[in-house]
Image (spheres, helix red, strand yellow):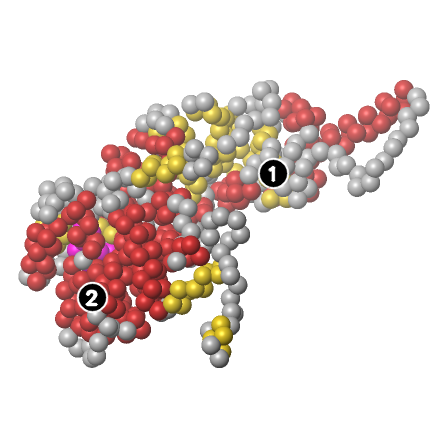
Amino acid sequence: MYLYDQPIYILSENTRRTTGRDAQRWNILAGRAVASAVRTTLGPKGMDKMLVDASGNVVITNDGATILTEMDVEHPAAQMMVEVAETQESETGDGTTTAVVLAGELLSRAEDLIESDVHPTVVANGYRFAAAEARSVLEGMATPADEERILEVARTAMTGKGPEAAKEHLADLVFRAVEAVRDEDGDIDLENVAIEGIVGASVDDASLVEGVVLSKEWMRETMPRTVEDARIALVDAPIEIRETEIDAHVDLSTTEQLEAFLAHEESELRAMAAAVTDAGANVLVCRKKVDDVVAGFLAKADVFVVQRAKADEMRALARATGAKRVSAVTDLTEADLGAARLVEQRDIGEETFVFVEECADPGSVTILLRGGTEHVVGEVERAVADALGVVRVSTLDELVLPGGGAPEIELARALREFAGGVAGREQLAVEAFADAVEVVPRTLAENAGLDPIDSIVALRAAHEAGETAAGLDAYTGEVSDMYDLEVVEPLAVKLQAVEGATECVELLLRIDDVVAARASGGSAMADAF
């Protein structure tokens, strides 16, 4: 800024400012870069990414949310695209790559309009109109979902990922797990579904435990390895003699005094053990440490003891067995105990676990996954987590859409018709939105090694003929009815992808001034602009 031809500095010398078209151009470029990073992972023929962090840890995946989370993204506009994926993942469990790729294409189309002198706010308004119409179109083409459709949703979510060969078995486990944790009001909290991955065996050896699997083991080998008709006590506090809050010094001058002191300490520990047995418990799980002497007394009484359980394991045990968590072992009563038909310690591979299963009404379950290597197990865990998310939203909404790019082609066709009724330059933005959503079937074709132009033309022709479920079979290259091929996606996934991508793009398009502070010593946020 200048006053009487003299410059006035209002920003520090370590600050960089980018305004106008330059700011918009750099933000759009950053968003498109993020989209291009995950675009090749989309669909059943999508490729995987290998991510290596500074410590040398390796992640191999084609899960969009995982890729973007593991990437060290600095640019603030790019971080907003990552947030789109994170929101998509948390809300629906799947569709992260679709949401990011769609956002990137919307930015690309918006850039073309801005270069043609269409104001960014006009583009943003047009995109908002199109997104509202898109919701109506998608809801109109959705169909009700029964149990078989929901299983198809789970299988579709795992197609193209590591455990695809075992997707039939895993989909069944996922569906049973979601049904097991549904409460009386119909709500489904996936925090009550634990996923435990163990290296060894094959993916087909996965199983569902109607209860809890603790990554712990008993305290003493003299304890029973198996407890049937278990009565389970849950204690949150340490089971040991408490240390005084102040430093204390005791003078013991005779042997009798020492013996009396030790006898008193032993009687206190014996009373703690008696509190467990008097309540009728034959299994004790403690959140904190259990004194070895107490464990010895309980072992003689054939009580199975686990110490230092995790907080989430304690919550899961309480929900699965009906036990009440107590803050002191001396407060334990018979009414606080939970029940399970079987508690057993098992060695699986090189690890030891405690299984608490066959509960009467398991409000918490565990999916036990297997795989030949840590990388395989990790990818199976991510695929099952995605399947849990889509099964949950499908169960709650009971509405699904065909996959294979069918919703996007139908959406593009409907939006082009809708654009004719939009006044002003917003019509151009609606048409651009229609072109942008076709990036999904186009990318599916590209990743499958097909000609994207021929595929889009064939899909458009089918939808013009009224075949709303017509999508691209990535394995044959043919246009087919996706319901017949059992390629099904939840309505909620598509709605969230469209709305999340649109909101992110609107926000980026309205930015025309970026002030970035340069970090001291080396890398600078300002350098991103």
* Magenta segment boundaries in residue numbering: 400-408
Q: Residue at 49% across / 72% down in the picture? A: 7
Q: Residue at 37% across / 55% down in the picture? A: 78
| Secondary structure found at label 1 | loop
Distance from disc 2 to disc 1, alpha carbons, whole Å, reads: 57 Å
Position in image of residue 307 (x %, y %) = 60, 32
Q: Residue at 17% across / 77% down in the picture? A: 421
Left or right of residue 53: residue 331: right
Around disc 1, counting alpha carbons within 10 Å, would you say few (fewer than 14), some (14 to 19), or many (20 or more)?
many
Left or right of residue 440: residue 380: right
Which mark, residue 432? 2
Position in image of residue 447 (x %, y %) = 19, 44
Nearer to me, 145 or 70: 70
- Of labels 2 and 1, earlier in sequence is 1
Left or right of residue 74: residue 428: left
Q: Is residue 394 visible?
A: no
Nearer to me, 441 or 205: 441
Left or right of residue 235: residue 464: left
Q: Which residue is mark 1?
A: 287
Q: Amino acid at mark 1?
A: Arg
Position in image of residue 518 (x %, y %) = 49, 56
Magenta highlight on residue 28: no
| Secondary structure found at label 2 | helix
Magenta highlight on residue 401: yes
Does residue 63 sit above or below 271 in this rendering?
A: below
Nearer to me, 53 or 16: 16
Nearer to me, 64 or 229: 64
Query: Which is closer to the viewer, label 2 or label 1?
Result: 2
Position in image of residue 133 (x %, y %) = 24, 69
